[in-house]
Each structure stands twice: as structure tokens, then as C-alpha cells.
Image (tube, helix red, strand yellow):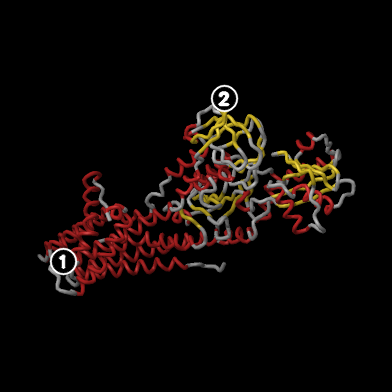
Amino acid sequence: MIEFLRNGEKRTLLFLAVSLPALIVSFFNLGRLPADAAWLAIVLCGIPIIKEAVIGLITEFDIKADVLVSMALIASVITGEIFAAGEVAFIMTIGAYLEERTVAKARAGIESLVHMTPTAARVIKEGRESIIPASEVMAGDILRVLPGETVAVDGVIIKGQTSIDQSVMTGESLPADKGEGDEVSSGTVNLFGSFDMKAEKVGEDSSFQRLVKLVESADAGKTKIVGLADRFATWIVVIALLSALITWAVTGEIIRSVTILVVFCPCALVLATPTAIMAAIGNVSKYGILVREGDALERLSKVKRVAFDKTGTITCGKLKVSRIKGTDGLTEEALLNMAAALELRSEHPLGKAILEHYKMYGKGSLAEATEFRISAGKGVSGLYEGKPAFAGNEVFMEENGIQLPEKLKDEAKAAKENGSTVIYLAGEDTAVGFIALADTLRPGIEDVVGRVHNTGIETALLTGDEKRAGLSMGKKAGIREIHTQCLPEDKLAIIKDYERAGEAVCMIGDGVNDAPALKAAYVGIAMGGIGSDIATQAADLVFIRDDIKELPHLLKLSKKMMRTIHINLAASMLLNFIAIALAITGVLSPVVGALVHNAGSVAVITNSAFLLRWRKEKN
């Protein structure tokens, strides 16, 4: 039970669960109790509010909404209005709980990344191999990484070749080929060949530990607009006190002054914003969108331009065969059969993409190549129809003594400039063609961009691709401004230029190179599952399902949420002032006044609840 009460959220829920029936018993005067049941609500919900108000006043002289609430509580108790005091404490505790839940929801799921931290390393010392905790690796140590193992620290390969899955750091689905002299990062996964590396950045200096540090330091914080009630609190307290004192002085009836303090309590005002934000967060969560920063939806409502990264954002991040080119009259079918036979036993994503293309478009039965061999990071070879055959990059061809015709190289170069990856195919000593693989646009991205434009928001593409490839993809997607050959610092500069021109920018990206832009943008949105990308930690929102189609709904909902908040704030203030006027004239008693402002709180919650199911357009 003690452990249960130490949990703030569970403790608050318990106090609310006990206070509600106590207030019902008090209002209807049920049973013969030795004391008013509303005292339970005062003790459980009211004392924490008074405590916070006193601490804030003494330590920082910070006048917040809880100061006025505390005054109303104490005045109600002194004059014997126990139910009114308990009801005010109960409603204010609900508002505080919802505010905390807004922040908690914003941070949900982020800490799962910590569990991905590499825990062990295979160290080579004096010719002997031993496994030690990753935290004990020192700079300069020699590590051996076997296929399937996670790289424990940052370093440089000194022996061996392989392909590394870097998706945890960059979001890129295609592994990076690595050889001697290449850098590898902690948290990435070795896919094929084993290699030896020299540790350089260890402990908290390693890439993955820096990522974890970023996660641990992430603080959703208090939603900016939630603070409106607190920002109004100073003058609300002053007006409430003056009104109560003047009314007491003029009428001589202290009960009217107590009623003024009760109805002046900003319960509806406090609930106006967090209830709308909670409902909006609940809405977008149904569509696979995680809100990490409490004020993200508020800021999103002010965005004037959406800037997209290309790979993995407007494209699928998965290579597909885009072109098959043969020499000496070889047909596409013959080249595809040859490539598929060589790649049949390959685990490399390029090989799998070729096999997938063969399954969709290939003809006839597939004859598996014999004497299959793989050269990590370069290519594969074997006997195809009894003759030597090769599939790989340009370096692989040179190593096997195969000359590439200039015409074939020129055509391959053109394919590369359009963003394609090229795999050459060759017989025993002659190149016979190549297969180009390229990323593809996400299905329906043109429609998504069009609907973004329909909201009055402009678009831009920020990509590191060559000019021709970037322009081609951007125009196909319907994006209006396209910036190519962008390094991370270039993306950052472009976003700052837009914002200096008065355009709040929402940046959408998926890789480590997007992280600075995501952090600097007015709103940052990351693609991909939680824990799969460093960009997730730099962003305010995350498309968990790696699907961008809900972007227009997200943009429209943010505007609808702000309209709801403004209506809630205006209605709650109007109700308060009407109730104050009635309290001054003696029409309302403290109990009735408590019920009136309770009705206002219910109205605010009801209005916000409509956001849960709101959707302006069909899926």
C-alpha cells in the first residue's frame, strides 16, 4: 500500500475515487455520519492544493490559480460551507490530473529506446578473445564483431568487410557497405562478415549513448497554453479579493464574500485547455501519431509551411528495380533470370529486391547458381548455367578482372544521378549489363501533398540527393519548392530562412541527418516506429506507423483544437463573471455557486470531448 501511495498518479486517482462518493453523500445528506462526508474531499484533494499554493508563495512569491482556490477552500470551511469546499477541491484536482496526463502522454514510449543500449563487447587482448560489459571498453581496444551482433562502441574497422544495418541511427533501410578504414557506430548491427575494429568513442561519448542521453533529458514540460490559467491568476486573485472585500464592506454579509471566492475559482478555466489537448492527443493516437511535446499541437496550428525530407518520408525507403539494361542483345528477362539465380541465397537487401522483382515479373523456373560466394559489401558470384557469373558493384568487377564498357558505365552513371543504386552483371570476363534499383514514392503522397495545400499551407522538399533525382521526386509528389544536395547544416539554414521570412515551419524527416532541422523547426515530426531513429528524439510528434497519410488530418485537428480551447476559455470566463454578479447581489449561496461553476466545468469537458472523434474528412 505504501508503494502504491508513492506513485503520484495512482495516489491522485485513489483520492478522486474516494472523494466523489463522499461528495455525493454530503450533497444528498445520506446516512447519519458523525461529520460531513465532504471533509474527505477537503483532506484528500484540498490539502495538496493548499500545500502547493503556500510553497509557491513562500519560495517564489508565485501567484497561481491554486492561491485563489486555497482562499476559497479556507473561507468556505471557516463559514461552514463544507460541501462547497470539497467540491472545489475535487474539480481542481481533476484539472491538475488531466494536465499531468497531458505531459505523461507526451512522453509515453520514449524510454523504450534505453533498453536497446549495447550491453557486451568481444575484446581481443594479447591474442585472446573475451566478452566484457560494453561499459568497460576503453578507447584503443580492439573489438571483434561477428555477424548478427550489435556494435558496442564507435570506432574504425581495421580488418574485414561487411554490411552494417544503421537504421537505428539513420532510419535508412539499406545497409551500408563497410571495409577497412570505415567508421562504425554503436547501436548499429553487423549483418554479414565478421570484422575487427579499433574503439574510438566509448561510454557516454559513443553515438548510441549520446542518443540515450538525449532521451533521458527530453522533457515534455508544461504545455504553454495550459499556463494561461496561471498567467491570469494574479489579476484574478486581486479582482476576487477586492470584490469579496467590497461586497462584505457594503452588505455586511460574509457569506456573499465566500460565495464570490467560490464562484471565482477558475475550475472551468483550468480544465479548458488540458481537456482539449487530451482529447486531441486521444484523437491522433488512433491514427498512429505520438505527441511527444505538450505544446506541439498548439504550435502546429500556426504552421505556414511543411518541409519534407525525401528518403523514408515522401518515399518508401525501400529499393525496387527501376531499370534493367543489357549489352549484346541480351533481353531484360535473361538478365533478370541471371541476377535472381545469383542472388537466390543472398541476404543483402539489394539481392532481396531483385528476387522480389523476379517473383513479380520473372518467367519460367529459376535455376539456382552453384558454388555461390559472397564478397561482403561488394557482390556475389557463382556458376550460372555451368559458367562463371558475377553480380556486384564497380569495385567487385575490377577485382575479378572484368572490364566495363564506357557506354554501359555512362548509362549506369545516368541512373545513379537519378538516385538509383546499380548492380553490374557479368560473365567470366565480360560485362553483360546492369540492374538499377531506386526508391519509390509512398503510395498516395501526391494526394497528401495536395490536401496539405488545400489547408493553405505551403510545402518544400529538403533532400541530400543530386539535383536531377531530387527535382524528379519532388515534382512527382507535387511539392512546390525543392532544395537539393542539402547537408544537415543546409537544411537547418533553409528552415531558419523560412522562419525569418515569417513562415513557421513544420519539418518532417526520418534520419539522423534530419535531427538538427527537426529540433530547430517550429514543429518537428519524425517518421517510423518508436526507438528506431534518433530523429524520434528530436521531434515533437512521431508517425509511429511510418505512414504520412494522416498529415492533413493532423494539421486540421490542431486548428480545431485551438478553436475549442478559445471557446472553452471564453465560455468559462463569461460564466464566472455572471456567477460573480449573482453572488454579489446575494442570488447565489456558496453551495449553489459551487454547483454553477461545476456545471461550467462539465460543459468545458463535454465540448472538449467532441475532439476525440472529430474528423473533417473521410479516410
Name the residue furthest front: 128
Badge 1: few (under 14), some or many (20 or more) residues near its Cα, within 10 Å?
many
Residue lying at 75% horizontally and 41% vertically, measured from the top left = 373
| Residue 193 position within the rendered picture, expressed as x and y whole percent measured from the top left | 66, 38
Amino acid of disc 1: Glu
| Residue 320 position within the rendered picture, expressed as x and y whole percent measured from the top left | 71, 52
In whole angstroms, how far apart are the C-alphas of marks 1 and 2?
82 Å
Q: Nearer the viewer's eye, disc 1 or disc 2?
A: 2
Q: Quadrant of residue 165?
A: top right
Amino acid of disc 2: Glu
Can residue 118 be seen at all in this image of the molecule?
yes
Residue 233 left/right relative to 159: left
Q: Quadrant of the N terminus?
A: bottom left
Name the residue furthest right: 328
| Residue 365 position within the rendered picture, expressed as x and y whole percent measured from the top left | 81, 57
Badge 2: few (under 14), some or many (20 or more) residues near its Cα, within 10 Å?
few
Residue lying at 30% horizontally and 55% vertically, measured from the top left = 4
| Residue 50 position within the rendered picture, expressed as x and y whole percent measured from the top left | 21, 54
**Secondary structure of residue under mark 2:** loop
Q: Quadrant of residue 27?
A: bottom left
Name the residue furthest left: 252
**In the rendered image, which residue does mark 2 sit on?**
126
Residue lying at 14% horizontally and 67% vertically, measured from the top left = 35
Question: 168 and 301: which one is in front?
Answer: 168
Can residue 239 be seen at all in this image of the molecule?
no
Question: 124 and 482: which one is in front?
Answer: 124
**Secondary structure of residue under mark 1:** loop
Q: Which mark is residue 81?
A: 1
